[in-house]
Amino acid sequence: MARLILFAFSLSTTGCFNGFVLTPVYVDSPIQETHVKSSEHWCCRNKIALIEVSGLIMNARNSGLFDSGDNPVALFKEKLDVAGKDRRVKAVVLRINSPGGAVTASDIMYQELLHFREKTGKPVVACMMDVAASGAYYLAMGADHTVAHPTTVTGSIGVIMSLYDASGLFRMIGVSSVPIKSGPNKDIGNPARTMTDEERAILQNMVNSFYDQFVQVVVRGRGISEDRVRPIADGRVYTGIDAQKLGLVDQVGYLDDAIHTAKELACINDAAIVAYDRCDGYRGSIYAASPHIPRELNVKVDLLGLGNQNAPMFLYIWEPGAPGLIK
């Protein structure tokens, strides 16, 4: 805390810093509805629920100075449950701003979204903000309609597992790895030695399996053939405009357009816009981010920004500049 105060003081001397406001928010508190925008008519009782999906998609609590402290998968499920039980909520708009995340976490959220639509019959519109790539795009395929901003970065259909070969460094400093293992592949991915061809084939087959699953999700979500999907599913990213031309999204527009489409799909003319936050969070507009500041300040140095995930994992993620052996 002393270092944080010193850092704030240093910034204040530059003349371009107005200070920190630290408001404790308890991440274990229940979700509460936050009013975002009123309906046009005072007698209208319809609602559109604005559900935010931001940051890394991981099935674990985020930690760090600027993280909410929530488990993204659990929070997403909790918000869907609230929207599903409220009869006045006629549709949902997902505001997505995420580079993706873990394979399993992305698939869980996708399946929960499909289950929500099937159980409630309420339409879902995905609105892609700055980034809706890889696992975040995977999630968007569970919506009825997808809207991308012209400048959205999306796509990145693919899988990556980032591993490192530090055997040369280990030899240089005189350190060796001596694993006691039950089988030849038990320490697969050990950075202290070069990966064998057999080990690479094992991991590559797993990556290929997860990639095939991703492709099929896009085929079902977009209603286009696998032959059309695979050539454009090589891991590259696209702008919202290019994504529409390729058939990866339905519409190029903005958040207001997504809300309008949600009303049309729900067959309503008017609705209030609501969001879900912890405690008494306030939003001034539909573009305002949730006002979470964690109750614990926990700063970690993490190469890939994956929080407290210590083990290598398969990822649906767009991570420019992240080195990896398995793609």
Image: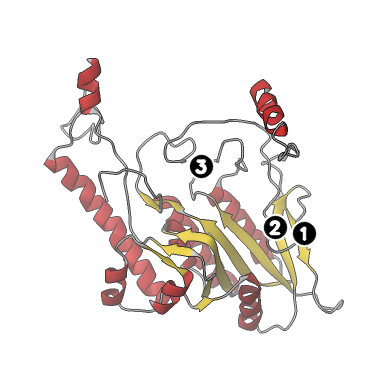
Quarter-of-image position of residue 46: bottom right
**Front-lying residue, 119 or 313:** 313
Q: Amino acid at mark 1?
A: Gly
Quickly name the residue at label 3: 60
* Disc 2 element: loop
Residue 263 in view here = yes
Give, as a three-letter code, the residue at label 3: Ala
Determine the image quadrant of residue 92. Answer: bottom right
Query: What's the residue type where badge 2 is placed?
Result: Ala
Which mark is drawn over residue 284?
1
Residue at far right of view: 42
Q: Is residue 29 left or right of residue 242?
A: right
Residue under pointer 2: 288
Mark 1 to mark 2 CA distance (whole Å): 6 Å
Foreground pick, 74 / 6: 6
- Where residue 23 sits in the image (x, y, percent)? 75, 39
Quadrant position of residue 78? bottom right
Compared across the picture, whether 20 is left or right of 183 comes to right
Identify the secondary structure beneath mark 3: loop
